[in-house]
Amino acid sequence: MPAQLTRRAVLGASIALAGTGVLADRAAASASVTHHPYPAGTTVPEGYVSPDGPEVAAAEQRRGAGPERRVALTATPSRLDLGGGITVSSWAYGDRLPGREVRVTAGDTLALTLANHLPASTSMHWHGLALRNDMDGVPGLTQRAIGAGTDFTYRFAVPDPGTYWLHPHSGVQLDRGLYAPLIVEDPKEPLSYDKEWVLVLDDWVDGVDGSTPDAVLRELTGGSGHGGHAMAAPRAADAGGGPSRMLRGATSELLGGDAGDVDYPYYLVNGRVPEDPSAFTARPGDRIRLRIINAGGDTAFRVALGGHRMTVTHTDGFPVRPTGTDALLIAMGERYDVLVTAGDGVFPLTALAEGKNASAMALLRTGSGAAPGASVRPKELDGQLVTAGRLSPDPSVALPARKPDRTVMMRLTGSMEAYDWAFDRKPYTADQRHPVKAGERVRLEFRNPTAMWHPVHLHGHTFALAGGAAGARKDTAIVLPRQTLTVDLDADNPGLWMLHCHNLYHAEAGMMTVLGYRS
């Protein structure tokens, strides 16, 4: 067994994984910066904290201002190679899928300049980060959209280590190629491992036989989407829209019934189809940290590494008590970190599109041997499976026991037939508010009488599952059909925070709302 290395040593030794924002530093330093004020035409109701208000500035000051890390990204139309001879026209951060990894250290100040070369406005949301509200990237709520041909610098303190990711919060742009990992290093990293493998899972439709996410949304809603937060302008190619992408008959016991709405032609790991997978090279006996991110629009993945057990160490960036498993269920927006000890050979990392009779795959290669076929189904997929509700938080991040000061109850409403997804039958508008006050312990109760599962995501906070200190810390969690999910959070980050289903099409149909801090 080789000596175990700290994460710092791993990063110094691994060019492929070392701080990929370094090359952008000089470009960012010379990039022009356009500062956008709070969104024109948007008003903050009296008595609520403004995203750029003094309460937000004070919270940011308490986080401190560490060393500045400059990065530049460009959102642009691009031809993307998915492997196996498949290329598609889409939108991406540069010419890569996923976009170039951004890596910082907790305590740093990130200054990322996003240049918009798209034919539509865009934005950037930092999924899972407890950052300042006016940098959260929700057009019409926390900022003005970044117009075509302009740029914007997001600048904020990065408080918490963990596995996060970035993506637009503008219409259905996330279901193109606009996403990238965001890895926040822990300066006091307690884990020991030899190598690190970042895995981004996705379902893909854009540019295939004329399909676009905008056309998919129109088909699902009958053209009556209620998202209302800067939906991207359709491209000319959207006029035809390609073949029907409506998914029927996909079911999963794990998800309580209906598995999803969209019939995707491809499923990807790190931007590659399973017929031509990406590969990660290690040595037998290496201890490897896998950071797994589900960037999909409509697909939960059941994930297993053939021939290996996994030890879950984190979910949504926060540590949990180490828990052994054969497989994981990962909803859209969720992240899991696991440790594995590599065997000798070539092993499939299979991400089964839950309930959809398809899968994505990458390879772990530690020795000689032929690669398994694209349709391989490791036996571990049917072995022990861990979901978030079975995890316990590490004591260092467990929410202290406390009686809730406020309970906010929400009903998840809608149906596949009408595609009228919403909270409490109220499609999203930017003036909605579920009031909370700074310093409160807030209990959220999500009641789901629908026949569909929903991965609910709260911006700017983490919550504890099961309504108390016993549950893992999360920012995205599955609410199963005909069940209620209860979570607790401390209201410690003032502003106006989006709360929504992370099924992209449910959100754009109207299943979004706002948690608003009273001033």
Image (cartoon, rainbow, N blue to C red):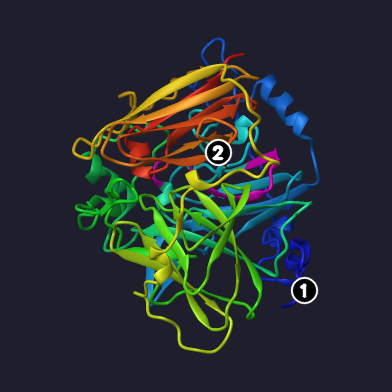
Amino acid carrying label 1: it is Ala
Q: Residue at x 75, y 55 (%)?
A: 190
How far apart marks 1 and 2 lie (CA) works out to 34 Å
Asked if residue 383 is positioned above or below residue 135 in the image, the reply reads below
Amino acid carrying label 2: it is Gly
Q: Which residue is mark 2?
A: 471
Q: Which residue is mark 1?
A: 3
Query: Looking at the picture, how far across and down is residue 340, in whole percent?
Result: 59, 67
- Magenta segment: 153-172
Characterize the local packing of mark 2: few (<14), some (14-19) or many (20 or more) Cα atoms within 10 angstroms: many
Q: Residue at x 38, y 27 (%)?
A: 428
Classify residue 77 as left or right of residue 158.
left
Tell me the quarter of the image containing the C terminus: top right
Query: Looking at the picture, how far across and down is residue 99, in whole percent?
Result: 54, 59
In the rendered image, residue 161 lying in the magenta stretch gets the answer yes
Find residue 483 and report its image quarter: top left
In the rendered image, residue 317 lying in the magenta stretch gets the answer no
